[in-house]
Every structure is written in C-alpha cells, then in structure tokens.
Image (cartoon, helix red, strand yellow):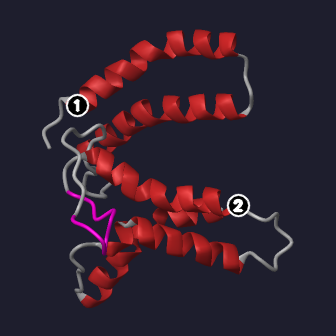
Amino acid sequence: MPFVLLAVCPDLDYVAVWLAGYGATPRFTHSILFGLGTALSAQWFVRGSTATRLPLLWLFLASASHPLLDLLVGAHPVPLLWPFGAEVAATVGVLPSAGALALDNYFLWRNLLIEMGVLLPVFALCAAVCRRTSIKRIAVWTACIAPAWAGFLFWSLRLAR
C-alpha cells in the first residue's frame, strides 16, 4: 500500500489547485528531489511499525515512477531536476496523455487500454525476472506477447501529442 501512495503523491498538488486555485509552475512534486523526500518520509513513518522494513530504494522507485511515466507521455516537460535544472522533455511520447476523468469519455478508456497494453508486459517481465523464472520460459512468453505489445506501442506512438 505505501508504494501506491508514493506513486500517486506527485499529483497531490492538484488538491491545492482544486481547493485554492493555486497552480505551482513548475510542478516541483514531479521532481527527483520530491520523490526522495517522500521516500524518506515514508520510511520514517513506518519505522516503528511491525511491518517489514521497506528498503529506501524501493520507496524511492515508487516515488519516482510517477514523474518518469509522465515523462514517457511526451506531451509536457517534467521538472525532474528541480530546483537544479530546467524541465526535461521526451522527444517521443511512448504513452498516451490522460483523457478527462469522465466515465463516458471514450479517450479515457482508449488511453487506459493502450497504457495497459504497453506497460503490463513490461511489468510482467520484471516480475518474472525477480521471481527467477527460467530464461527459456521468459523467452517463450516474450515471443508470444511481443507482437501484441508492439501493436500497442505503435498505436501509442501514432497518437497526436
């Protein structure tokens, strides 16, 4: 559960927008420094609990996953290096940008499908490697799923940014 909270944390600045009309530019919550701060805070909060000690690297990767995925959208620059540098922009968008959050929005569902088609095979491969699945089994699985993954990736790359 702390990993999901950390991954969503960069978008908490929307609360300031919704409640007070305040919109920070650049959105420093999408920086590596903010990710490190939230990871350290999470580690500090769980320090006295009976939960297993969560490695700082895992907490940081969860925190950094959100701005890195936003970077893969390629629609807007992301202030990854704030306050030390300019915003970083990807020249090619690998993921679609988010549609308006409305259940009747076709683009929301289309983009969600594309994101799952691009990301789930990558996450499954990471899980297989972490579980020390045999190379042969990973190779067979990859050969079977690669055409569908490539189709979703091609679909995403062709979207207007």
Quarter of the image where the N terminus is located: bottom right
* Mark with earlier residue (2, 1): 2
Q: CA distance from mark 2 to mark 1?
A: 35 Å
Height in image: 144 above or below 35? above
Residue at image x 18%, y 35%?
A: 159
**The magenta stretch spans which residues?**
77-86
Q: Is residue 22 left or right of residue 138?
A: left
Residue at image x 54%, y 55%?
A: 61
In the displayed image of the protein, which residue is found farthest to the front?
A: 84
Q: Are marks 2 and 1 in contact (CB under 8 Å)?
A: no
Amino acid under disc 2? Pro
Q: Is residue 94 left or right of residue 138?
A: left
- Residue 76, image x, y percentages: 19, 56
User: Is residue 115 found inside the magenta-colored segment of the image?
Assistant: no
Residue at image x 82%, y 76%?
A: 49
Q: Dot 2, crowdedness within 10 Å: few (<14), some or many (≥20)?
A: few
Determine the image quadrant of residue 51: bottom right
Residue, disc 1: 157
